[in-house]
Amino acid sequence: MNLSLVEYLWLLVLMTTGTLLTRSLFFMVGGSRRMPDWLQRSLSHVPAIALAAIIAPDLLMVQGALIEPWLNIKLISALVATIFFLTTRHMLGTLVVGMLCFTALRVWL
Amino acid sequence: MTSPPTEQTYSAERERAAFFDAIRTSTQTMPGLFTWGVVTGAAMMQSGLSLWQSLLMTLIVYAGSAQLAALPLLAAGAPIWVIAFTALMVNLRFVIFSAVIGPHFQHLNWRKRLWYGYNTVDLVMGFFPQRFPAHTLGKPAGKQGYFTGLALSTWLTWQLGSITGMVLAQQIPASWGVGFAGSLALLAIAIPLVKNRPTLVGVAVACTVAVATVHWPYRLGLVSAMLLGIATAVVTEQRMAKRSETS
């Protein structure tokens, strides 16, 4: 990737607008207006789904192709990290365990 | 500004006390937040952004998970609008934050409300509603001070961490695979967001579609995966609600 200055500035403007729009929305719209329940429930699904769509190809594929899961060191490390997170709920520890696993597999295999 | 002067002096003291209270409360989360900033800063540099590009993005966009989400797309050369759309999707959780915190600040002018909104980060959502539950609406005392304390300590800790990460990243060889730390960070953000079955079903659909459409041009596969995943989650939720009504 090599962003031109114009592309970079566009990205900066759009992403900043995104931050402002989402975080300020109910600060800006009037007084007692509340978010309908169904909308709140629908919105609550979106971030996890968006993140999953980004991560999945990264973890499941190697250079754009599905490979056997037991040969995919990123996938194995991510699974170990997931199990660690589900048992401890510790975000940074999850990162450390995942990276240690990844590095160990990368060096020894 | 309609209150008499004596009450205002009293209130200024109260805001100051609330401010320091918030600083004290947030110290426990600072080491974690700092390290998280380091990871994000380093990941930005590793994805090919220059130092000043990373710096400006951190200082202005100021949304760690959206920045992390943008990085693999940037590295893959996705179009700007796809990256911005993805960042917006990840940021949508903030709409819920703003719905909880925003009503407490309706007495301020719009510029202040925009500024407070911009600063409604995870730490604010984590601590503010505990101290000021919904029944304190309409009683503004202490809220600005408390909010500012949380927001300021978050901003400083996060930015210091990010800048440290950017500087460190220049010393780390690419072969260490720090880019993968970015993926793990996204994973650790995503897992606790999966709180019920409809979200989980949506996540499964999104993963499948994202993998199946990975070769589509302009990363349109990613956008399709998100939209199909969201649609599935919403439909699943409605079905579950109907089923529990009839049973």
Image (cartoon, rainbow, N blue to C red):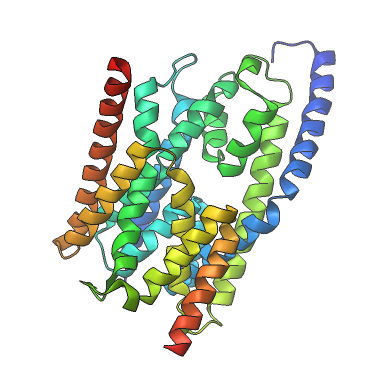
Q: Is residue A60 above or below residue B141?
A: below
In this orientation, which residue lies closer to the viewer: B143 or B195?
B195
Q: What is the quadrant of the N terminus of chain A in the image?
A: bottom left
User: Residue at the front extreme?
Assistant: B247
Residue at 57% across, 30% down: B112
Q: Is residue A13 above or below residue B10?
A: below
In the shown orientation, is residue B210 left or right of residue B54?
left
Residue at 37% across, 52% down: A51
User: Residue at the bottom extreme?
Assistant: A108
Residue B108 seen in this snapshot: no
Q: Quadrant of residue B104?
A: top right
- Total numbered circles: 0
Q: Quadrant of residue B241?
A: top left
Residue at 35% across, 61% down: A8
Residue at 24% across, 32% down: B235
Residue B149, position as x, y percentages in the image: 71, 40
In this orientation, which residue lies closer to the viewer: B123 or B185?
B185
Residue B2, position as x, y percentages in the image: 70, 11
In the shown orientation, is residue B171 left or right of residue A65?
right
In this orientation, which residue lies closer to the viewer: A44 or B35?
A44
Residue A86, position as x, y percentages in the image: 52, 53
Residue B6 seen in this snapshot: yes
Q: What is the quadrant of the C terminus of chain A in the image?
A: bottom left
Residue B45, position as x, y percentages in the image: 47, 71
In this orientation, which residue lies closer to the viewer: B138 or B246?
B246
In the shown orientation, is residue B138 left or right of residue A63?
right
